[in-house]
Image: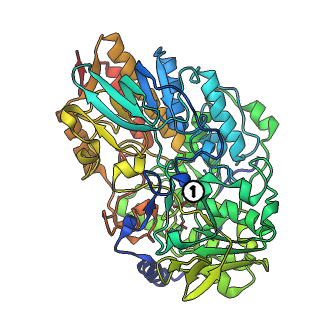
Amino acid sequence: MTTCGPSSTPTDLDIPALREKYAAERDKRLRTDGSAQYIHTGQGERDDFFEADPHSPPVVREPLHEDVEVLVVGGGFAGLLTGAHLKEAGVEDVRIVDMGGDFGGVWYWNRYPGIQCDNESYCYIPLLEELDAMPSKRFPDGAEIYEHCRAIGKHYGLYDGALFGTMIRAMRWNETTRRWTVTTNHDDELRARYVVMATGPWSKPKLPGIPGLHDFAGHTFHSARWDYGYTGGSPGDTVLDKLHDKRVAVIGTGATAIQIVPYLARYAKHLTVFQRTPSAVDERRNPPTDPEWAASLTPGWQKRRQAAFHAFASEPFPTLSPAEDVACDFFTEVGRNVSARIAGCTLEPTELAAIREQEDYGVMERVRRRVDDIVHDPETAEALKPYYRYLCKRPCSSNDYLETFNRPNVTLVDVSATKGIERMTARGLVAGGQEHEVDCVIFASGFEITAQDLSVASGIDAIEGRGGLSLFDHWRDGFRTLHGLTSHGFPGLFFTGNTQGGGNASVTANYVQQGEHIAYLIAAATARGAATIEPTREAQDAWVALIKELAPPKTFLEQCTPGYYNNEGGGHGGIRPATGERYGRGFYEFDRLLRDWRDAGDLAGIELVR
Ligand code: NDP
């Protein structure tokens, strides 16, 4: 295996000019309505894009009226990893509820052609050692990851009691029973001592706020609910043979579209890609897993590899040398180049930020020049170049996305000047005053990741704690938690995902960390004979204050082009990071903090409710 080192990036850069160009490109796209521009799905609006399940028959059953020890909302990685830790901690009565027909979360729903993991699977796919599993290649297909989710479910006995095809409608704390009353679309009434929210940020598709969206008379679907009946093919067979006489439009050019577009181009009569902001697309090194390397791994290898990956990809201060960068790809490139520059130096945060910015310009310029090397038409090539800083948007990799725009049956339509597609008509889409007639529109328009309204983001109508306090109101001006996991006034309710905890470049490691801590809390409360637990207001306030004190300045996000990473550049709701309010010292410092807290054994800041 070759050793990694700093990458070669262009040095002939005019950084002040690029800085101006980045600002102009951002301003061109900024909208005053921010995230309010989107149209929500579900709750009566395009339910077929959210609630309808193309992969499993509808579940028909009698309503359940039962007591449950731990109810987990969501059976994706967050729910599975919490469930696994609960079982390991000896908590047996765990009931995972999911609207899908099986475990998997995003890997259950997203079955579009070309779907693959896009960050290193050896880090991203959790519990590889525990399940004695190994991905077939560096970025495996979605189906393989879905099977791994199912394997976790089987390995930890999580299928027992799982409720699929079931949507939570409301959750209300009952002071008399000291339990949560949870109601569902099947009229179930589940009385849970503990509830873990594991709905994940990518569960609810959203639609672009294009005037006339409902006027279009052709076929439509969202990338997360792929309609193989219309396109031909199946999740295991990407020959989309029914598209040979179809004019297809794709709206969006994020990480999903990068994977879909080459397949559509191959089979559609004509493909029009509507782009508001281009993604940064690097080459995709995706070799099969080397069996000799796999055999050489020693216990603990996955956690060590994750730590090395995160050191370059997401930790605030690079601490390793470039040779230790095991992933050695676009995700780690800026961090690796920074670490090469600062080796052995002690730097002020502003000096570090300045070096990071220079390396960022170099890497993004390398990626822009890659576009010129691949795309023949200069105007199309220019439109495909990302003018923003690395990590303003999800970094992408593909060996055939940019190449697709050299095909005669593919057109790129740049809608940046009008901040999006102007309108939809019965026949197609209007951009630059020109109508593009199409038979089918595929929305690769993303998910409700930063929706201001938590009810919209979760798809749950009500979450009410003590005294009927709505979680949506409680958090309207920002999260209020202890360790990102519990909130005062909401006894026995736990959160996972992006709240006020650690964060890194492979989200599943967050879920492992959170699942472990939640399982510890529940097991500790049970061992002490508590009816439930709740953080004290003082502990919560102190945690919120610490999170705010350590928060990095918002300058980076303010300067970014709009997207879900910065809550669409502000506008309605202001600049908010999609990653929540992360603990500013980094994922591993947060991990140490949680471990020390557990080791102390006194449940500091947690009240046992008797
Ligand atoms: P995104 O939110 O990243 O992209 C949505 C796209 O729709 C953007 O290109 C956006 O443009 C465009 N859009 C929205 N409104 C309009 C409009 N009115 N007119 C024209 N275009 C519009 O969604 P994705 O599904 O691509 O990705 C979401 C996330 O899912 C990723 O960032 C990643 O975290 C995850 N993912 C992970 C994968 C994996 O393999 N692990 C694979 C795919 C996705 P603009 O950018 O200008 O807002």
Estimate the x, y position of residue 166 in percent, counting from the top left: 50, 35
Q: Position of residue 11 (x, y in %)?
A: 59, 76
Quadrant for ligand 1 reads bottom right
Q: Work out which residue is located at the far bottom of the displayed protein and give it.
A: 433
Is residue 260 placed above or below 189 in the rendered structure?
below
Residue 379 lies, with reference to residue 359, above or below; the image says below
Residue in view at x 74 percent, y 65 percent: 264
Q: Is residue 194 visible?
A: yes
Q: Which residue is mark 1?
A: 336
* Quadrant containing the C terminus in the rendered view: top left
Q: Residue at x 53, y 25 (%)?
A: 84
Q: Nearer the viewer, residue 337 or 411?
A: 411
- Mark 1 belongs to which amino acid? Arg
Q: Dot 1: what SS?
A: helix
Which one is in front, 363 or 201? 201
Q: Is residue 84 depicted above or below 249 in this figure?
A: above
Horizontal placement of 595 versus 124: left or right?
A: left
